[in-house]
Each structure stands twice: as structure tokens, then as C-alpha cells.
Image (tube, rainbow, N blue to C red):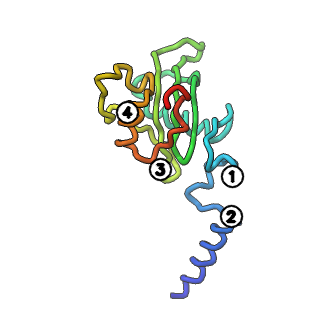
Amino acid sequence: MKRRPLKLIALALVTLGLIAPPAFTHLQQSDSNADQVHTPPSGSPERKAILDALREDQKAAFPNQKIVYKVHHLKVHLGWAWLDVTPLNEKGEAVAEGGPNLLHLEKGSWKVMDLSKVPEDPNDPLGPEDASPGFIKNLRKVYPGVPLDVFPKHSK
């Protein structure tokens, strides 16, 4: 019972923005970016965290290689990121075709979502490669919280 006032004070400080909730303190994104679509700038902690999560997820595909990603598209909004990248080796040479990826911020860490869970549309043979309206509709059935504005403009 004696701890309840401390919890209420902490909740009030978080609500007023005087302290950050512990799970999100490492994101280091500006408050102006937290609730609007944005592209994290090169070298920013947020962009690094997203690309590091992707690198970790794809580590088995590139054993003993240091992978750098050429980013063709990256938009983040409300804890979701859609990016299209090409993996490069240290010499800047493509080591695979690359392609689109969906990541979600869960408990303070970016996680790569499995796009193979998205049902295929027989009228849309490119699937995530094109991120057509049909693909996005199916994707949002599997991952309902994804905001539309993270996808490339031609996709909507």
C-alpha cells in the first residue's frame, strides 16, 4: 500500500513528459517524430537499431560477412517500419537481391515480421516486392496495426 503513491507520481511524471517510460528511453528519437511518419536520418540511433535488427535476423544468410544495407525506402510510424534494402559487402557489392521488410517495435526492440505469413494474391504476383494495395490489405489482416503511410506512395 505504501508504494502506490510512488507509482502514481511516476505515472504523472510520465504523462506530463517530465520523465520517459523505461521501455522507450533508448529509442532516442525526437518527440516530433514519435507520432508522425518519418525517415530516420543516416547515422541516427533509430535507423541503426532498425538496420541492426534486420542484420541480426539475416545473419544466417550471410555468415562471416559484415553486411551494410543500401536503403532504397525507409519509413517509420507508430512503432512500424517498412524498408526496402539491398545487402552489400564491405566493398559495396550486392551480395543478394534484397527487398522489402516489415519491422515492429516490441518491448523496446525492433523485430522483423514474417512476410511469408501474408496470403498471396493471385492477381498480384510481385507481392511485397511491389507493395500493391492488394498486398497491403492482406498484410494489414496479418499485422493490423501497420499504418498505411509507411509504404511507398505508389502502393496506396
Mark 1 element type: helix
Mark 2 element type: loop
Question: Which callout, 4 or 2, points at the residue further toward the start of the chain?
Answer: 2
Question: Which callout, 2 or 3, points at the residue further toward the start of the chain?
Answer: 2
Tag nearer the camera, 2 or 3: 2
User: Pointers 1 and 2 in contact (CB under 8 A)?
Assistant: yes
Viewer-proximal residue, 144 or 20?
144
Q: Amino acid at mark 2?
A: Gly
Per the rendering, the mark at residue 31 is 1
**Residue at 57% over, 43% down:** 77
Question: Which callout, 4 or 3, points at the residue further toward the start of the chain?
Answer: 3
Question: Which callout, 3 or 1, points at the residue further toward the start of the chain?
Answer: 1
Residue on which disc 4 sits: 115
Q: How many marks?
A: 4
Residue on which disc 3 sits: 106
Per the rendering, the mark at residue 9 is none
Mark 4 element type: helix
Residue on which disc 2 sits: 17
Mark 4 vs mark 3, CA separation in Å: 17 Å
State the image coordinates of residue 20 (x, y, percent, origin top left). 64, 61
User: Pointers 4 and 2 in contact (CB under 8 A)?
Assistant: no
Mark 4 vs mark 2, CA separation in Å: 35 Å
Q: Amino acid at mark 3?
A: Glu
